[in-house]
């Protein structure tokens, strides 16, 4: 694209090997239709257009044909079998990326991926080995015990963490190799941080919300926000 910003070179992983149990769709949610296209196709197109090379997709066991159907007509991606947890899927995909300086690791379940987030993440990698998009917590927080409020938690320092998460490749590769418990990490930023890497925060975007529950598939139109520029 002529008007594409000049981005530093980067590789990408899209993890699409989950079962999507909470979404209750007839197919795993990454293959369900959302705004006219399979969920997975949205972010893969964005990443390919942004120049991600290589782009490795972790796919479910027996899910290769579903991925190829969802991505029909696109070129420039490779598939690897995922694992039984997200962390295992990431680790396998990292092993398949032969070499890269920078890498974005993204959930297929977050189809709407704004380019400015990619720009902010890659810019932050100039100064830190990791960078993640975050948003503030707006609601007040209640600590629940036996169904009732048993306390509160200060929200000022808390942030909601999204993907894509960006890393210097060698740093995240080493961190995943060193991570002992493949099942317990919530995301890759935690893996990097546990290995001593500093993870920068950049501004996230509400559009990156993860499709998780059946109701997330009921609203298929972008919300109309009058007078709000959000980039
Ligand atoms: N994922 C993966 N491999 C796994 C589990 C999850 O690649 N073994 C991916 C999912 O495909 C998704 C992302 O990780 O793109 C975030 O996970 P989540 O939203 O929890 O998706 P699922 O695990 O598929 O959904 P659920 O937990 O409801 O079953
Ligand atoms: Mg899951």
Image (cartoon, helix red, strand yellow):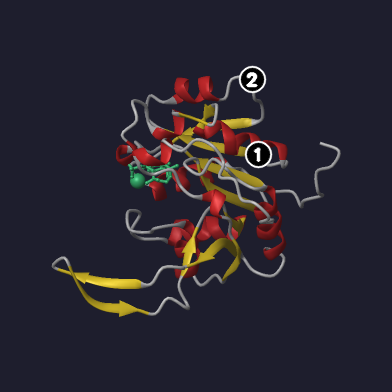
Q: In the figure, residue 201 lies in which quadrant? A: bottom right
Q: Is residue 219 above or below residue 204?
A: above
Contact (Cβ within 8 Å) of mark 2 with mark 1 = no
Q: Nearer the viewer, residue 185 or 20?
A: 20
Q: Position of residue 106 (x, y in %)?
A: 53, 47
Q: Crowdedness of circle 2 by 10 Å Cα count: few (<14), some, many (20+)?
A: few
Instruction: Locate residue 178 relative to residue 56 in the image: left or right.
Output: left
Q: Nearer the viewer, residue 194 or 224?
A: 224
- Tell me what residue is drawn at x 49 percent, y 50 percent: 209
Q: In the figure, residue 229 lies in which quadrant? A: bottom right
Residue matched to label 2: 73
Q: Crowdedness of circle 1 by 10 Å Cα count: few (<14), some, many (20+)?
A: some
Tag 2, which secondary structure? loop
Tag 1, which secondary structure? helix
Q: Position of residue 169 (x, y in %)?
A: 61, 55
Q: Is residue 1 above or below residue 143?
A: above
- Tell me what residue is drawn at x 51 percent, y 72 percent: 196
Instruction: Locate residue 225 relative to residue 145 in the image: left or right.
Output: right
């Amino acid at each position: 694209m002529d008007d594409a910003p000049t981005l530093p070179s980067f590789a990408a992983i899209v993890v699409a090997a989950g079962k999507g149990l909470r979404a209750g769709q007839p197919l795993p949610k990454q293959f369900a239709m959302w705004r006219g296209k399979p969920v997975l196709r949205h972010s893969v197109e964005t990443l390919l257009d942004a120049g991600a090379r290589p782009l490795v997709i972790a796919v479910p066991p027996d899910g290769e044909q579903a991925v190829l159907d969802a991505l029909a007509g696109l070129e420039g991606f490779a598939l690897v079998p995922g694992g039984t947890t997200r962390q295992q899927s990431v680790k396998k995909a990292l092993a398949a990326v032969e070499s890269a300086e920078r890498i974005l690791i993204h959930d297929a379940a977050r189809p709407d991926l704004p380019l400015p987030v990619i720009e902010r993440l890659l810019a932050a990698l100039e100064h830190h080995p990791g960078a993640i998009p975050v948003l503030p917590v707006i609601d007040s927080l209640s600590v629940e015990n036996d169904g009732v409020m048993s306390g509160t938690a200060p929200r000022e320092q808390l942030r909601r963490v999204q993907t894509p998460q960006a890393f210097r490749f060698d740093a995240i590769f080493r961190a995943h190799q060193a991570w002992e418990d493949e099942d317990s990490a919530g995301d890759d930023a935690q893996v990097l941080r546990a290995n001593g890497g500093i993870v920068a925060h950049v501004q996230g975007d509400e559009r990156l919300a993860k499709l998780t529950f059946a109701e997330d598939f009921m609203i298929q139109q972008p919300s109309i926000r009058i007078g709000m520029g959000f980039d």
